[in-house]
Amino acid sequence: MDKAFGVQGGKLVAIVGLGHIGGSLAITLKENGFARYIIGADVSLENLEKAMRRCLIDEAVSLSEALERADLLILAIPVDSMLEVLPEVLDRISEEQVVMDVASTKERLHEAVLSHPRRGRFVSTHPMAGTEHSGPEAAIPNLFDGKCCVFCDVEDSDEDAKVLVEGLYRSIPMQITYLGRAEHDLHTAYVSHISHISSFALALTVLEKEKDEKRIFELASGGFSSTVRLAKSSPDMWTPVFRQNRDKVLDVLDEHINQLARFRTLLIKREFDEIYRLIEQANAIKQILQ
Amino acid sequence: MDKAFGVQGGKLVAIVGLGHIGGSLAITLKENGFARYIIGADVSLENLEKAMRRCLIDEAVSLSEALERADLLILAIPVDSMLEVLPEVLDRISEEQVVMDVASTKERLHEAVLSHPRRGRFVSTHPMAGTEHSGPEAAIPNLFDGKCCVFCDVEDSDEDAKVLVEGLYRSIPMQITYLGRAEHDLHTAYVSHISHISSFALALTVLEKEKDEKRIFELASGGFSSTVRLAKSSPDMWTPVFRQNRDKVLDVLDEHINQLARFRTLLIKREFDEIYRLIEQANAIKQILQ
């Protein structure tokens, strides 16, 4: 445990939204001492109760109370709710407090608070970690360890706010990288959003066929599970992501459909040497993923 | 260890093709005593040497020698080579010997030996296990444990041959299921072949973009790795699979492209309620995958 985050130095952290990400952060920051005390707020009373039962938080509070008491507010809510909650929080936040988010899309959010007088108190981050599960029951330790966290448009945050949130992620530890909001949304469209659409579509393809062929899943093995795993992901989280990153997701989806159409054309024309070459090209992903 | 497969009862097994699957079977059948002695053949001398070095096999032999000596021959070679090797093996196999395959596509293979006088000595199986890795260096223990193995057109095999190969899979143990060859090829197109095309295409989509955006993989996390994992798979194995199962793969690929096009249309029209509903439908995969 870093001494700077010992019991005396630890912060009073409010986590707003106690789902998979908020709940996992709660476990992590309590364990490593970054948080001295964690208060939690959630629009769902059921989630609040679950979070108390699982000891994710020390105390359940309202958003208003969180705003009054916390040194640091962490907003871990779907990106559509973020558009409403972040401006409200900035309206009422003091110069000593900091608010950070963990949202998967950034452009619309940043634009919603661009000229807010308290913009500097907000630090925009996206820890690149998560699973297909959701809710406080899916909160797990070690979800973030060693992963990458993006800070977006960090020059728009006050220096002390930035330093505090960098300290939070380094306490886990996560690797920090800095991107502009547009760049962030483009990159996540490629390495996260399209993977989800691909999985949803793959699941629907096979589920559709299963209506006639009841035994089709008997043969499903690790490879299939791996490619459709993300199809278990929550529509509450993902629909707003696709809404906010619509244009970039559409560009990537078009490219992905084009790549599938290349395979289709080559299959139709029986150009298997070319299919071999495409697979070899795709194999280059080996050098990139460890 | 099952007593029936003790040192005295164990078989002399020849494994032809010492890649990921053949090599992993070698480890498994030696460990559990089903095989008393394993001889191995491979067109690649390098693979044969690696297999000896890793002690996957007791002795390296030619295909001819394998045919002379083995009680059971296991063909674990790409499906295009299967079309040549299986008829040759059946031409020379005795009434006491058995040959089995582990091929991913069945219709063309079965048709190639349909009226062969020794067809009964052949047992057609497809253990539904494997990873994106290939070669003898990728041979691992426990690859098959508890997974499903398909027996195809088992009524075309002699009773004693069938019983022997069922014993092999039960010794692992794997769960056995029985399908016709056309049914097998349809089901694998849905739960295996399309997953691979989807992964290859997704890898190509992102690799293409990486030419301009060098930092795009910094943000790749578990979800992305999961959906593109299969893109590391070998073109030597997969090109012949797509060639042999071309028509069924094309049908599934068309359906998959249609499902992606549904998402695309809904994004274009900003029909996010309908996207929510589609994701909810895709979530039904939860009930099917454990």
Image (spheres, coloured by chain):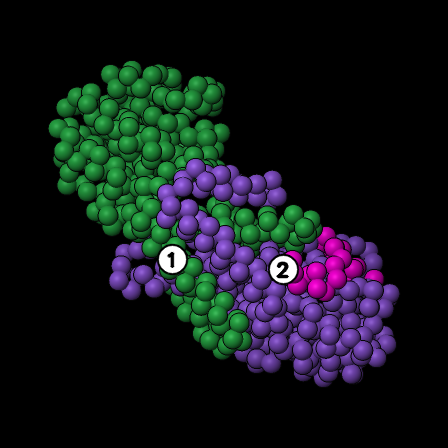
Chain colours: A green, B purple
B192 or B253: nearer the eye?
B253
Q: What is the chain identity of the residue bearing mark 1? A: A
Q: Position of residue B195 (x, y in %)?
A: 53, 58
Judge whether A22 appears above or below B121 on screen.
above
Q: What is the chain identity of the residue bearing mark 2? A: B
Query: Can the viewer see residue B46?
Result: yes
Q: For the point 18% across and 30% down, which residue is it?
A: A121
The quadrant of the picture occupied by the C terminus of chain A is bottom left
The circle on residue B188 is: 2
Magenta residue span: B163-187
**Residue ID for mark 1:** A254
Judge whether A109 appears above or below A30 on screen.
below
The quadrant of the picture occupied by the N terminus of chain A is top left
Which secondary structure lies at badge 2?
helix
Magenta stretch contains residue B106? no
Q: Amino acid at mark 1?
A: Asp
The majority secondary structure of the magenta stretch comes to helix
Q: For residue B284, what is the image quadrant? A: top right
Which secondary structure lies at badge 1?
helix
Q: For the point 79% across and 54% down, which residue is it?
A: B2
Query: Can the viewer see residue B59?
Result: no
Q: How many marks?
A: 2
A237 or B257: nearer the eye?
B257
Q: Position of residue B261 (x, y in %)?
A: 45, 54
The circle on residue A264 is: none
Magenta stretch contains residue B174? yes
